[in-house]
Amino acid sequence: MRIVGHIESYTDSTLIGWAYTPDRRGEPLILAVECDGVLLAAGLANLDRQDVAAAGHGDGQCGFRIRVHLPPGRAMTVREVSTGTVAFTDLHTPAATDDGDVAAAEATAARSDIVQGNVDNVLGAVIRGWCWQPGWPARHVRVQAVIDGQVVATAMADEMRGDLINAGVGDGDHAFNLRMPFWTLDGRERKVAVHAEGHGPLAEAPVPFMCLGGGPLPLLEQLSVHIDPQDGDALAASGLLRCYLDQVLRVTPASIGFEHYPQWRAAQAGTPAEDDIPDAFSADRPGMAAAVLNLRMAGGAQLTAVLDEGAVLYPDALTRAARALAASGADILYGDADMPVDGGVLPWFRPDWNYDLCLSQDYTRGLTLFRSALLHDAGPAPSATALRLRALLRHAPGGRVQHLPEVLCQLRRAPGPVAADQAAQAVRDHLAARGVADAGIVTIDAQEGLRRIEWPAPAEPPLFSLIIPTRDRLPLVRTAVESIEALTRDAAYEIIIIDNQSREHETRQWLADGQRQGRFRVVRYDAPFNFADMNNRAVEQARGGIIGFINNDVELIGGNWLSVAASLLARPEVGAVGARLRFANGMIQHGGVVVGTGGLAENAFQPVHVDDKGYFHRTRVAGNYSAVTAACLFCRRSDFTILGGFDAENLPVAFNDVDFCLRLRETGALVVWTPEIDLYHHESVSRGRDATPERLARAMKEELYMRRRWAHIALADPCYNPNLNLDGAPFTGLALPPRHRWGIGR
């Protein structure tokens, strides 16, 4: 047997490295550590090591961390157990000093000036890798991208990555993403050296970098115009290449950082055809007050444009917006905007019509166009902004509203308390008109105009059935249950625990005691782990009208969670409700789900702390998303049953919650994420990683199904924006290329 691998370090009585055999791909090696022929320890080489796979070795599941105490100064050998093949030999541990401490390697590793790292790969406009100082594991190193001796980009190596934990790289928070500047995205190949600041290059040779800011499809379009229309083979080849490139963009999207927005916008907008800004909307209008302008379009259509207070139009924006409204046949059109932030300019890329977000935040602020009759129906208002929002809330939920995902104006300031009060009154009037005058409106931030809507409780308080799957892991499930029992108030509920083949005596005893005491019911699921199927079966035995799918690794923070869910689900248009989930350190783990990331789906706002505002305050207010995670998901039992529950056949483990939410949205239902339902979550800690060949095969099958089933929205999530990134964490960069082709200047 041929074994490929490397011993990376021996620190804190742990032997760290990676190993695999090309002869049996997908089968992890069992390694034994020997010293002078005596077996000291053994371990499995199956830990996640994507950095090794990126370097061309193995499948990324070949890392090992073997706890073993090695006598100082003695030779050791590492063998593969089943065949006895020597993997590593003639390895010596450091000799002991007079003080009994291990010197040599550990002393070298403890030097603060030693830096280790690797450039893993280049994806789109981002160079990814890791870097740290073993002697100062709590510190984070700044890395630099260097071209021809000039530093062109920098980043802190402070991002979390699970495979780095397995590799013994501190706490795993030493990954970096170097976003290259826009001027390098011209299709030319460049050699980029990646340096640890003050320490030198991470790799022996520079890495090749080449990226097109507009993507490859525009080049294909330029070539296609020269194809002879009679050349069937060439046309077929062009079509096939287009399909291939489209799939590449879906699976491996690229992006660039927000700091490059001015260059990025210039590339999308082009040169304005004309400066069409009317005097009423000029930047020097008195006090930059809100303004209204009536427009007569070709054919006699009457439009009214509303420009909010503090907004400055970009040239050609009004013409482009009017043209887009006429082409769409819609009644209302709003666009995107940008704002000065921290000395720069940050684009505010909005979702398509998002009812709950509009109630919580006036996210359409800027330039809005209406068919004039709609504003006449809205009645009197204290300001143009209040008139706009009143008309929007009156007609958009059931009408035709178009979102133009292009920056039409710049907002020079926040709305402020006066405009916020007027917006809140418009929301209050709207809620009264729809028959919920007793809904409460609580101001969260008067300067930014943020609100919380306290929907009235249903006339008949519902019974909640809270379903919690588990397999052993008693400390986790006990914490989840006890936090629910201790904190929940003002709601009736039952707890159903799905016991998926628990084997530990303590767990089985706790389950039996709890069921006997009436604290919960236990449903046995004596089959391999199938999250979808076990939950479907538990719903069949549930008594409640509202189902709450709850992970066994969550811990409740706020006690009003069920009353919030009940109030939201009392609205007939709401189909599912999701929660804010946070890690123990306060970082957000789930702030809604964005569809299309890597062609699949990704939790939003994971790089954001709960005390931070997120992308234009999205983490502070409720809003609609395409999906929410089933780690804490509420829905009506009737809706769940009508839709057939989770898809246990095609999505037994992953993405079944996303698929369910997307099927709900196909019926016209809204999915609401709210920060008012708040829990701690340790993601998938009880199930572990998909590391075995069987799990990897299952995961690939589920991913393929999701790509096929939901291909039509993979690049067009209506609750996201086609100008925002789909690589990595959502809301963190600008798409390259954007998934909407701008029309300004064309």
Image (cartoon, rainbow, N blue to C red):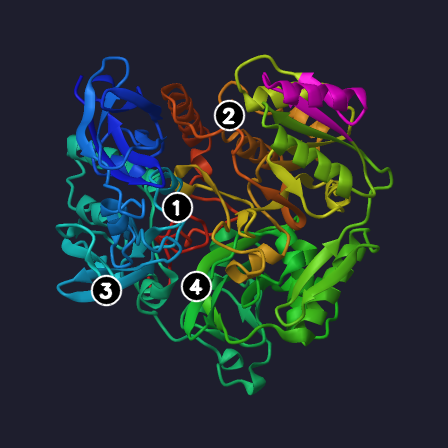
Q: Is residue 500 inside the magenta stretch?
A: yes
Total numbered labels: 4
Image quadrant in which you'd find residue 540? top right
At label 1, counting other C-alpha atoms closer than 10 Å, the crowd grade (few under 14, some 14-19, many 20 or more) is: many
Closer to the eye: label 4 or 3: 3
Query: Is residue 442 something one can see in this rendering?
Result: yes
Is the C-beta separation of discs 4 and 2 under 8 Å? Answer: no
Q: Which mark is residue 653?
A: 2
Residue type pointed to by label 1 = Gly
Q: Are marks 2 and 3 in contact (CB under 8 Å)?
A: no
Mark 1–mark 2 Cα distance, whole angstroms, equals 26 Å
Q: Residue at x 57, y 73 (%)?
A: 414
Q: Are marks 1 and 4 in contact (CB under 8 Å)?
A: no
Q: Which residue is disc 3 drawn over? A: 198
Q: Which mark is residue 172?
A: 1
Mark 3 Cα shell of 10 Å, populated few (<14), some (14-19), many (≥20)? few
Going from N to C along the chain, the mark reached first, 3 or 1, is 1
Mark 1 and mark 3 in contact (Cβ < 8 Å)?
A: no
Asked if residue 25 shows in the view, the reply is no
Q: Secondary structure at mark 4?
A: helix
Q: Which residue is mark 4?
A: 320
- Report x, y in % for residue 608: 51, 55
First in sequence: mark 1 or mark 4? 1
- Is 524 placed left or right of 37 in the picture? right
Q: What's the residue at 56%, 40% (across, down)?
A: 627
Q: Amino acid at mark 2?
A: Val
- State which tag comes first along the sequence, 4 or 3: 3
